[in-house]
Amino acid sequence: MPGSSLIMVGVLAQRGVVAIGLRAMEGPLLKDLRSQRNTRVSGPVVVYCGSLSCHNSHSSSMASSVWSQEEKAMEAIKDALRALRQRHLLEEGAHGPAISALSKPMISQGSEWKEKTEKLEIELQQCYKAQSRLSEQLVIEVAESRTSKSSLQDKELLILGLDKDLSQTREECTRLQQELEEKTKTLDLLITENKEVRSQLEVMTNRAQKAESENKMLIDRWMLQKMQDAERLNEANALYEEMLAKLKANGLENLARQQVDGIVRRNEDGTDHFVESTIPSTCGHRIHAHEGGCGSILFEYSSRTLFTGGQAGPVKMWDTNSGSLIKSLNGSLGNILDLAITHDNKSLIAASSSNNLFVWDVNSGRVRHTLTGHTDKVCAVDVSKFSSRHVVSAAYDRTIKLWDLQKGYCTNTVLFTSNCNAICLSIDGLTVFSGHMDGNLRLWDIQTAKLLSEVAGHSSAVTSVSLSRNGNMILTSGRDNVHNVFDTRTLEICGTLRASGNRLASNWSRSCISPDDEYVAAGSSDGTVHVWSISKGSIVSTLKEQTSPILCCSWSGIGKPLASADKNGYVCTWT
């Protein structure tokens, strides 16, 4: 340190003698020491004192002193010198000879001690430098310690926050565990209830199976009863035919016809309207009516106007004289599978694959009703021959429904077991004929929904059912490529028509009877239309113009033309 003195106190204990060496680097301290000494001093100041036992306590106090600041060192040195001086004066006489004997070798060692002192001074300077470096390092470490302390405080705060979050999470976990326990209890309760419901379901299933077996038994008994009723009806029909023969013999043929038909068809003027049909042979017009196929065609009563229905499009109205389009009836959905028109030509009804029936006003072209109630596609429809109010429809939901057009809803429903492809109302509108997938022709009372009679007419599905104009015959066509003519009174086959090349194209291939009830026309999958004579049972004409399968045929009520529609959407009129 600046202005400081270097003081070195050495205590040597050897052979019972204590040596203490002091050296003052600065002038004032050395002069003070020399003035207080009675002995001669040259170079370093050396003092030899007493024996080891006399100076043991003083040597211990001097050896245990430490480096301190300059003022404290000077005071300590002065006190030590005074004490030494007093003891030296007291013991100088006793130790004089020893001192003189030792002073000579000690003087000679003064130079060595000086060199050692200089080395120690150099080491002390190095110690100061090391102390300064350590001080700087200490400052840095103190700063780092403060930084670490601040970081430690931040981490303690973070730990407190995390502890708080942990406590909240534990509370949430406890709450969720409680909710889980509640939901587990609820689930156990639901499982128990489910088991109970399953047991009840098994009981109900057993009851349903038992009821179904009983129902089947009742149906069998009911069918047996109906067969017996049919036999009685056949007997009644035979008796009726016998009576009719007697009436004919008495010249009352017209009266017998009225009794058989129930009603004589009349035109708008109120007179009987019977025409003679011509055998078609020539294609008058070839009309591209619909894209994707034409599945249903129908003529107006006593008119050459033709209606056509196709896939996902409007019903179109055509003039067959010119082959031009009159109008389109929009508003339907799905494919049109069948068409029917009221006897006054005012309302047109279409059966659609969208499970609905659409009723148009022909004059305005607007939809009057959308009849809903079927749950599957509606494949057949017919209208009463003398009433514009009642309509029947059949669908693949295994039902026949009776509709009231004035009210716009269903008034009765007939249920059966086999899907129905075609239906036809009787002349009086009280019974309906239905052709089914199982090949049977069934006769129903539409008011009571009861089966009146049933006959197995085909070995495969029935595709078409058509009633003759006088109501005495009904024509059925089947996928077995056979066309049967039934007597409506007895449901007995009175004619079977077939051709080697005639193969029906679909489950809804429609055949037709001519207005004079003399001819039958049916299309084939090779695009050919065959015309049979009912009385002869043979083909009288084969019409070939279309190349794709024929889906339906319709004969105009005035005797001509005959129309046929194919799978490509083309319609041909034949005269």
Image: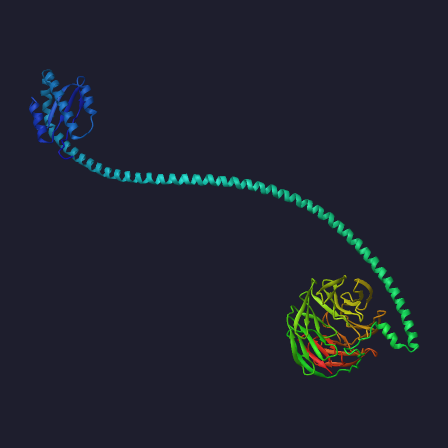
Question: Residue visible at 83% across and 58% down?
Answer: 222
Q: Is residue 559 left or right of residue 23?
A: right
Residue 459 visible in this rendered orientation of the protein? no
Q: Which corner quadrant holds the C terminus?
A: bottom right
Instruction: Tell me where residue 511 sits by quadrant.
Output: bottom right
Instruction: Tell me where residue 277 sits by quadrant.
Output: bottom right
Q: Is residue 37 left or right of residue 129?
A: left
Q: Nearer the viewer, residue 164 or 23?
A: 164
Residue 204 visible in this rendered orientation of the protein? yes
Residue placed farthest to the front in the image? Answer: 269
Q: From the top left corner, tell me how far across and down residue 219 is, in percent.
A: 81, 58
Q: From the top left corner, tell me how far across and down residue 496 is, in percent.
A: 82, 74
Question: Residue visible at 20% across and 22% down?
Answer: 60
Q: Nearer the viewer, residue 38 or 66?
A: 66
Question: Residue visible at 82% across and 77% down?
Answer: 534
Q: From the top left corner, tell me how far across and down residue 527 is, in percent.
A: 71, 77
Depicted 211 relative to depicted 122: above or below: below
Depicted 147 relative to depicted 509: above or below: above
Q: Nearer the viewer, residue 67 or 214?
A: 214
Q: Is residue 407 left or right of residue 261?
A: left
